[in-house]
Image: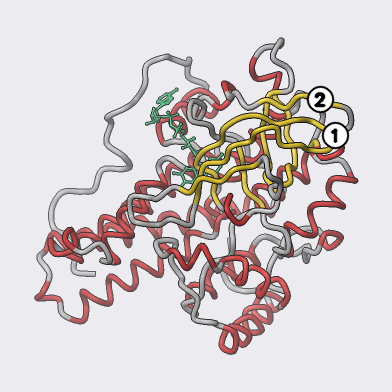
C-alpha cells in the first residue's frame, strides 16, 4: 500500500487547501457545540458548491465519481484547516443507491447530495432500538398514499429535516423482519410533531422525538419494494458503522494533537497518568487511521464490506472514548464543575458513540455470530470493559 498522494490527489489537495484558506467561515468544528448542528447545512452547501462534497458518488446525481481516497484527503484537510468535518450522510446515499428505483434515485439523490434537501433517519423507537425489527410505527395504504402513525426517537437532524428516511410496518401478518418497508416521508406537514431532546453535554440541536399522527406519504415515495425495509435498514446501518464513511479519523487525530500540544507546552503541569492517557489516545487514533487506510484500500480493490463494519464501529467507539478520556484527564478535576469545559463535553459526547448506529454490545454479537461464525447466545455481554486493555506502567511523555 502506497500512502503517498498520486499527482491527481496532490493537485486536489492543493486546490482544496487554497479554497479552505479563503473559505473557512469560522464555523464551530465540534459536535459538542449546538451551533455546529445549527449551521451544518450552510457548511454542506458551501462544500458542495465548491465541488468538494459527494466526491465518490455518481456524477449523474451531483457527485464526482472519484475513488474514496479523495474523501480521506478531504477529511484530512478539513481537520488541518480547523474547519468542520464533512456532513455524514453517505449511509443514506448508499441505502437509496442500492435499493431505490431509478425514479427514486433521480428524484432524491441530487437534493440529498447537494444539501439542498435535509434528511433524517427515522428508524429507532422508544421500544425498538437494538431490536429494530420490533418497531411499531405503521404505514397503511389509503388510495394513492400510505398513512403513517407512530413514534420515532433519537432522530438526528429531525428538526431541520425536509425528508425522513422512515422505516415502518406495512404488513403486521408476516414475521416481524418481513413486514417492514422504507419511505421518503415529507416532514413539513401538520401531522408530524417534533419534540426536541437535550443530550447529557447540553446539546439541544442534534436530535429529537418525532410523532407521526396520520402523516401522509405518496405510494411512489416507497424506497425499494414492500417488505424490503429490513434489508434496506441493514444496508444503511452497515455503512453507518464505517469510520471511513464518517470522516471521524481526522477529527480524532486533530483533537489528540491539540491535547499533546497542551502537554508539551507545560509538561510539568501534568501528572504521569494524565500524560499516559494522552499517549494512549494517540496510539488508538493512529491504529484507527491505519485500519481505515486498509479498509479503503480493500474498497479500491472492489471488496464490499458487510457485517465486518461492526468491527470498524467498535474500533471507532474505543478511539472516540479514549480521546474523550484523555480530554477529561487533561482538563483536570475543575472540569467537573464547569459545564462549558471542552474536555468534559468531548468526554460526554463520546458516550453516545457506543450507542448511536447500534450499541457496542450489539456490534459484539454481530462480530461473534456473523463474522466469526460462533453460535448465537441469548446471554448479553453487558458490564465487560470496553476496548483493548491499556498496558500498565507509564508511557513516554507524548
Ligand atoms: C447521538 C445519537 C444519535 C442517534 N441518531 C439516530 C438517528 O438519526 N436515527 C435513528 O433511528 N436512531 C438514532 N439513534 C438511536 C440509536 O440507533 C439507538 O439508541 C441504538 O440502536 C440503541 O437502541 P436503544 O437506545 O433503544 O437501546 P436498547 O436497544 O434498549 O439497549 C439498551 C441496552 O441493552 C443492550 N442490549 C440490547 N439488546 C442486546 C443484545 N441482543 N445483546 C446484548 N446487549 C443488548 C444494549 O447494548 C444497551 O446497552 C441515535 C442515538 C444516539 C445516541
Residue at x 83% of width, y 26% of height: 142
Counting from the top left corner in percent of width and height, residue 251 is at 45, 65
- Check the image and report above or below for 118 versus 151: below
Q: Residues within 10 Å of mark 1 (few under 14, many from 20)?
A: some
SS state under label 2: strand
| Along the viewing direction, whichever of 210 and 285 lies nearer the viewer | 210
| Along the viewing direction, whichever of 102 and 151 lies nearer the viewer | 151
The image's mark for residue 141 is 2
Q: Locate the N terminus and report the quarter of the image it occupies.
A: bottom right
Name the side, left or right, on which 149 lies relative to 292. Answer: right
Residue at x 46% of width, y 70% of height: 29
Question: How are the residues colored?
Answer: secondary structure
In this view of the protein, can residue 65 be seen by the observer?
yes
Counting from the top left corner in percent of width and height, residue 58 is at 81, 58
SS state under label 1: helix
Q: Give the residue pinned by disc 1.
A: 219
Do tag 1 and tag 2 residues touch (Cβ < 8 Å)?
yes
Name the side, left or right, on which 67 lies relative to 154. Answer: right
Q: Residues within 10 Å of mark 2 (few under 14, many from 20)?
A: some
Counting from the top left corner in percent of width and height, residue 280 is at 27, 57
The image shows a total of numbered marks equal to: 2
The residues bearing labels 1 and 2 have C-alpha atoms spaced at a distance of 8 Å
Counting from the top left corner in percent of width and height, residue 136 is at 60, 23
Name the side, left or right, on which 320 lies relative to 135. Answer: left
In this view of the protein, can residue 279 be seen by the observer?
no
Q: Quadrant location of residue 396?
A: bottom left
Amino acid at each position: 500500500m502506497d500512502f503517498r498522494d498520486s499527482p491527481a490527489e496532490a493537485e486536489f489537495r492543493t486546490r482544496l487547501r487554497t479554497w479552505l484558506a479563503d473559505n473557512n467561515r469560522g464555523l464551530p468544528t465540534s459536535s459538542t457545540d449546538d451551533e455546529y448542528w445549527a449551521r451544518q447545512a450552510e457548511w454542506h452547501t458551501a462544500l458542495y458548491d465548491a465541488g468538494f462534497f459527494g466526491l465518490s458518488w455518481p456524477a449523474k446525481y451531483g457527485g464526482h465519481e472519484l475513488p474514496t481516497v479523495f474523501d480521506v484527503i478531504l477529511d484530512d484537510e478539513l481537520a488541518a484547516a480547523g474547519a468542520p468535518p464533512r456532513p455524514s450522510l453517505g449511509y443514506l446515499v448508499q441505502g437509496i443507491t442500492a435499493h431505490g428505483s431509478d425514479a427514486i434515485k433521480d428524484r432524491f439523490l441530487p437534493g440529498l447530495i447537494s444539501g439542498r434537501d435535509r434528511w433524517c433517519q427515522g428508524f429507532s423507537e422508544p421500544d425498538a432500538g437494538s431490536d429494530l425489527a420490533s418497531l411499531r410505527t405503521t404505514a397503511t395504504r389509503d388510495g394513492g398514499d400510505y398513512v403513517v402513525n407512530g413514534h420515532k426517537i433519537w432522530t438526528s437532524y429531525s428538526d431541520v429535516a425536509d425528508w425522513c428516511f422512515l422505516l415502518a410496518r406495512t404488513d403486521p401478518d408476516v414475521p416481524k423482519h418481513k413486514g417492514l418497508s422504507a419511505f421518503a416521508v415529507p416532514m413539513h406537514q401538520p401531522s408530524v410533531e417534533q419534540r426536541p431532546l437535550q443530550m447529557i453535554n447540553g446539546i439541544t440541536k442534534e436530535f429529537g422525538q418525532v410523532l407521526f399522527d396520520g402523516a401522509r406519504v405518496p405510494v411512489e415515495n416507497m424506497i425499494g419494494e414492500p417488505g424490503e425495509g429490513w434489508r434496506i435498514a441493514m444496508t444503511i446501518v452497515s455503512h453507518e458503522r464505517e469510520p471511513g464513511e464518517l470522516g471521524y479519523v481526522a477529527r480524532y487525530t486533530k483533537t489528540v494533537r491539540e491535547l499533546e500540544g497542551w502537554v508539551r507546552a507545560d509538561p510539568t503541569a501534568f501528572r504521569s497518568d494524565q500524560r499516559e492517557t494522552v499517549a494512549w489516545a494517540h496510539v488508538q487514533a493512529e491504529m484507527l487511521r491505519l485500519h481505515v487506510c486498509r479498509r479503503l484500500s480493500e474498497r479500491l480493490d472492489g471488496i464490499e464490506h458487510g457485517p465486518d463494519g461492526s468491527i470498524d464501529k467498535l474500533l471507532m467507539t474505543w478511539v472516540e472514548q479514549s480521546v474523550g478520556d484523555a480530554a477529561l484527564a487533561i482538563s483536570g478535576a475543575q472540569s467537573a464543575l464547569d459545564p462549558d469545559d471542552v474536555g468534559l463535553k468531548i468526554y460526554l459526547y463520546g458516550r453516545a458513540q457506543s450507542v448511536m448506529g447500534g450499541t457496542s454490545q450489539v456490534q459484539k454479537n454481530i462480530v461473534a455470530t456473523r463474522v466469526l461464525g460462533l453460535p448465537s447466545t441469548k446471554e448479553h455481554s453487558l458490564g465487560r470493559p470496553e476496548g483493548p486493555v491499556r498496558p500498565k506502567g507509564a508511557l513516554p511523555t507524548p
